[in-house]
Amino acid sequence: MSDKSFLSILTGSFSTPCADNPTVAMIEAAYRHHDIDARYINCDVKPDNLADAVRGAKAMEWVGFNCSLPHKVAVIQHLDALSEAAKIIGAVNCVTIRDGRLTGDNTDGKGFLASLKDVTDPRGKKVLLLGAGGAARAIAVELGLAGTAHITVVNRDPAKAEIIAALVRDNTRSDAAAMPWDGAVSIPEDVDILINATSIGLGDKDALPPIALDSLKKGHIVADVIPNPPRTHLLREAKARGCTPLDGLGMLVNQGVIGVELWLGKTLDASVMKRALQDIFGSAD
Ligand code: NDP
């Protein structure tokens, strides 16, 4: 008999639709690179089946799973505990299973923050955040917890922007305000970091969030959450004006790194994961 184990560690993702979610490709590339005997299984889970899927993961002794749309809020009722950020954000995209207990975290904002920290320390910085959906909410809370000075949330529906600004003010030391998005937004002189956290640009290399391009100045950091295509119109305009561009691949990769650290206690090589995504989507450079 061989003493080789034929039982792989199981991880994965529950969402629907999920066929265009590339996370499996980047995480399994890193598992292979590190010779980790683990699998990441991309599962199409409809809302009515979420409870069974969570029970199944627990029964099959998965060590953890990601939750994407539409399960990020609904999964919370099936969990035993939440991280501080997940509690504030009110959404979970990463669940760790240990000794039968399920703990929810939110790595959307943490992944963004890790990527941002490659180019700047957010402490004391002023941020203009475009969008007030799930990604914007997670990013705003993590930026607040990381010590940004001020976040202005800009959205077509200002009531949604105000909910996020209030979350930041009430739960972090950062100040925050909401602003309606009427016409082309001008980037105020004292802003250090502009973030597109809308879905504008997803799958469309020519789409551009309505901003006054001449207000983009050398020294601005311009980040986009859009992973596909990574070289968005906004980032091309920013680079041409001497800003520091930051693509959405970094956010995606770092979420994967943080998730696997929570599940396996191992830090994957981010460059292997980024290359796997670049093979799929192309490069932002
Ligand atoms: P939501 O649907 O929750 O939010 C979308 C936001 O975009 C809303 O604020 C919406 O404004 C705004 N928006 C959409 N179209 C327009 C428009 N034409 N003009 C102005 N605002 C617009 O989506 P999520 O927050 O979950 O995701 C946003 C993007 O982030 C997605 O494209 C997703 O792919 C990406 N993402 C990337 C990740 C990564 O790892 N790189 C991780 C998570 C998300 P309104 O409220 O007015 O409708």
Image: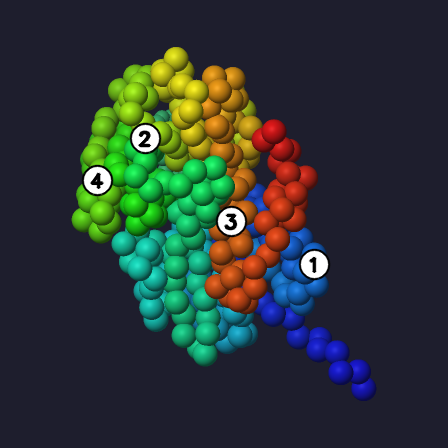
For mark 4, what is the residue? 175
Mark 3 is on which residue type? Answer: Asn
In the image shown, does 269 or 160 lie closer to the viewer? 269
Check disc 3 and report the residue beneath it: 254
Where 273 falls versus 231 (above or below)? below
Q: Marks 1 and 4, Cα distance to the nearest angstrom?
A: 43 Å
- Please provide percent x and percent y for residue 199: 42, 33
**Where does label 1 land, which residue?**
32
Label 4 residue SS: strand
Q: Quadrant of the N terminus?
A: bottom right
In the image, 75: left or right of 248? Answer: left
Mark 1 residue type: Arg
Q: CA distance from mark 1 to mark 3?
A: 18 Å
Q: Residue at 64% of width from left, 38% of height from top?
A: 278
Disc 2 secondary structure class: strand
Does label 2 or label 3 sit earlier along the sequence?
Answer: 2
Q: Look at discs 1 and 2 and give the one toward the viewer.
A: 2
The residues tagged by marks 2 and 3 sit, at their Cα atoms, a distance apart of 22 Å
Mark 3 to mark 4: distance in Å?
26 Å
Amino acid type at image mark 2: Leu
Reading the image, the residue beneath label 2 is 128
Q: Earlier in the sequence, mark 3 or mark 4?
A: 4
Residue at figure coordinates x 70%, y 56% from the top left? 33
Q: What amino acid is found at the position of numbered circle 4 in the picture?
A: Asp
Looking at the rendered image, the disc whose residue lies closer to the viewer, 3 or 4, is: 4
Return the residue found at the far right.
Answer: 1
Q: Secondary structure at mark 1?
A: helix
Front label number (1 vs 4): 4
* Residues under numbered marks 1 and 3 in contact, where contact means CB atoms less than 8 Å apart: no
